[in-house]
Image: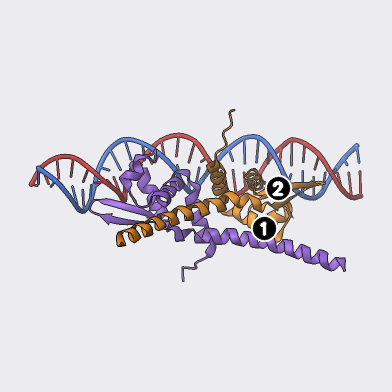
Chain colours: A orange, B purple, C red, D blue
Amino acid sequence: MGYEYRMSDAQDALFKTLADPTRRALFERLCREGEKTVGALTARAGVSQPVVSKHLGILKQAGLVRDRHEGRQTHYSAQLGALAPLIDWTREMAHFWQSRFDDLEDLLKRMDQ
Amino acid sequence: MGYEYRMSDAQDALFKTLADPTRRALFERLCREGEKTVGALTARAGVSQPVVSKHLGILKQAGLVRDRHEGRQTHYSAQLGALAPLIDWTREMAHFWQSRFDDLEDLLKRMDQ
DNA sequence: AGTCAGCATAGCTCATTGGCTATGCATGGA
DNA sequence: TCCATGCATAGCCAATGAGCTATGCTGACT
C-alpha cells in the first residue's frame, strides 16, 4: 500500500503551483504561444535562467507542462488537461452552494403551503 | 493616480488565498454547510481560534467570504461570485490553447489544397 | 458593577520559498 | 580535441507566511 491518493492533494499542488506570479506567467505564455525553449522563456521572464528552470520543474511536477529534449535545448509546452482538478473543484463549490440554495427554496415552498 | 487596477491582481489574490489548505478547507466548509460562527469553524479546523480568525480575514479581503455581526459572535458565509476571475482565467487558458489548435488545423487544411 | 464568553489583534518563532551566483554536464561546431 | 552554448543543479540569503500564546475589546448575563 503506502500510497493513498487523495483528490485534495492534486488540488493543493495546482493551487500552490499557480499561486506564484512568475510561474503562472510562464504557464500563460506556454498556453498563448505554444511550445518554447528555456532560453526563449528566460528572455522575457524578468528572472534568471536558473530560476526559470526551477519554475518549469515545479510546473512539470504538477503536470501543467511537459518537456521535450532536442539536442542541447529543452522545449516546454502546456498540458491543459492538468487544469481539470481545478475546474472540478470550482464546479463542486458552485454545486454545494446551489444545493443549499435549492434546499432553502424547497423549505420556503413547503412553508408556503 | 496611484491606483491602476489590473485583472491579474485579482487572480493573484485568489490563487494565493486558496493555495493554503487550511484556508481552502474553511472556504469549502462554508460552501458546503453555509453560514457558520468563528467558534463553530474553530471546533473542527485543527488550528487555534486566532489562526482561524486570521484566515477568515484573508478570505474576506479576497472577497471569498463576508461577515455578519450578531451580538458577540461573528457569522461568516461564502461568496461564490468571488470565484469568477478564477473561472475566467481557466476559460482564457483553454481558449488560447484551442485557438492554437485551430490555427494548426487551418494551416494543415490550406496545405492540403 | 463585575465576570465570563466570543472574537480580533499583537508579537513572536520557525519553516518554506523565490531570488541570486557559481558550477556541472551534455551537445554542437570549429 | 577543444571551446562555446543551453540547460540543470547546488548552495546561499532574505522575505514571506502559517502557526502559536498572550492580550485587548465588546456584548451578555448576574
How many discs appear?
2
Query: Residue beneath label 1, please?
Result: A31
Q: Quadrant of the C terminus of chain B?
A: bottom right
Question: Looking at the image, which is closer to me, B17 or D24?
Answer: B17
Q: Are marks 2 and 1 in contact (CB under 8 Å)?
A: no
Nearest the viewer among C19 and B72 is B72
| Chain at numbered mark 2 | A
Look at the picture and state if A76 lies above or below A109: above
For this view, does B36 lie left or right of residue A63? left
Residue at the limit of the structure toward the bottom, as seen here: B1
Residue holding disc 2: A66
Residue at (48, 53) in percent of width and height:
A93
Say what amino acid the circle numbered 1 marks.
Cys
Left or right for A1, reference A35: left
Q: Residues within 10 Å of mark 1 (few under 14, many from 20)?
A: many
Secondary-structure class at tag 2:
strand
